[in-house]
Amino acid sequence: MSQDAELTLIMGQRGCGKTTVAKALVKSERRVIAFDTMGEFAQMRGWKVAHDRKAVAQAMVKAGRGGFKIAYVPPAGQEIDALHFLSEIIWRYQEAAAEQITLLVDEADLGIPKHNLPANRGGVKQLILRGRHRGVNMIACTQRPALISSSYISNSAHIYGFMVASTGDIDQLVRTFGRQHKAAIEGLQKFQFLYRADGQICTGHTMKSGALKVNSVRT
């Protein structure tokens, strides 16, 4: 693999454009697994649907060196356990892999919460901290920025911030993008976002076509 993989975070309330960004980011990726808590990716054409981790592993092996897009719909209420075991499968799979893989986690505050996970549920933490060395990209989507792991936020190379409603979530976006951007955060409209990468912050919006438009750099 030519370069380290990266973490991406997409934050915003329901219906603001998060899934549009996520779909745009994985559209051209060859190997993607969606931790599909809401079943959105399971409804998309070309995605293999799995309802347990054994089916995920079988689909990965069956694809061989080819590409795959797998939507894993975990049992409701078991997101932490399900994401842990899925993360372990990906970690082992990538040990000898020559190509990167992308793990997309929907409703990430359920599987990558702010509170500490039990020591025997450290699979996703391993991907966050060390996955880049095995070519594991991660994309996390959350409606509740205040409830997602601070470790994930601080290790994210790309961050999209859409409109949020609660004071705690607004405060988290302000901490993430900087207090100088508070007015811009509070003024975000539907489908508009702030984007942070490489120390720079831009504005942008999603388009009806499913594409993203990133505007000029904010100072």
Image (tube, helix red, strand yellow):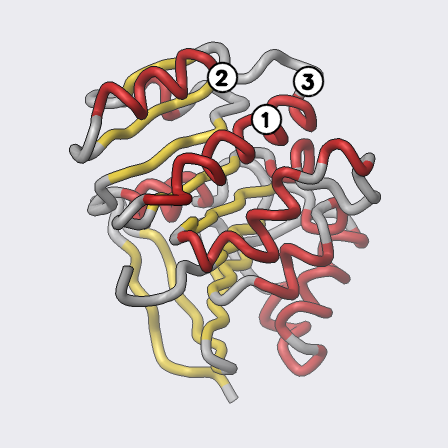
Viewer-side residue, 123 vs 109: 123
Q: Secondary structure at mark 2?
A: helix
How busy is the neighbourhood of tag 3: few (under 14 within 10 Å), some, or many (20 plus)?
A: few
Mark 3 or 1, which is nearer the eye?
A: 1
Q: Residue at x 26, y 49 (%)?
A: 98
User: CA gap, disc 3 to disc 2?
Assistant: 12 Å
Dots 3, 1 in contact, CB < 8 A: no
Residue 126 location (% of width, % of height): 62, 48
Viewer-side residue, 149 vs 216: 149
Residue 77 location (% of width, % of height): 70, 16
In screen coordinates, is 5 left or right of 110?
Answer: left
Q: Disc 2 marks which residue? A: 53
Residue 210 location (% of width, % of height): 26, 44
Residue 179 location (% of width, % of height): 71, 78
Viewer-side residue, 1 vs 212: 1
Q: Disc 3 marks which residue? A: 78
In screen coordinates, is 63 left or right of 183?
Answer: left
Tell me: residue 8, above or below residue 194.
above
Mark 3 or 2, which is nearer the eye?
A: 2
Dots 1, 2 in contact, CB < 8 A: yes
Tell me: residue 160, above or below residue 56.
below
Q: Residue at x 68, y 32 (%)?
A: 110
Q: Secondary structure at mark 1?
A: helix
Q: Residue at x 48, y 83 (%)?
A: 218
The amino acid marked with disc number 1 is Phe
Q: Disc 1 marks which residue? A: 85
How busy is the neighbourhood of tag 2: few (under 14 within 10 Å), some, or many (20 plus)?
A: some
In screen coordinates, is 63 left or right of 19?
Answer: left
User: CA gap, disc 3 to disc 1?
Assistant: 11 Å
Q: Quadrant of the N terminus?
A: bottom left
Viewer-side residue, 216 vs 111: 111
Dots 3, 2 in contact, CB < 8 A: no
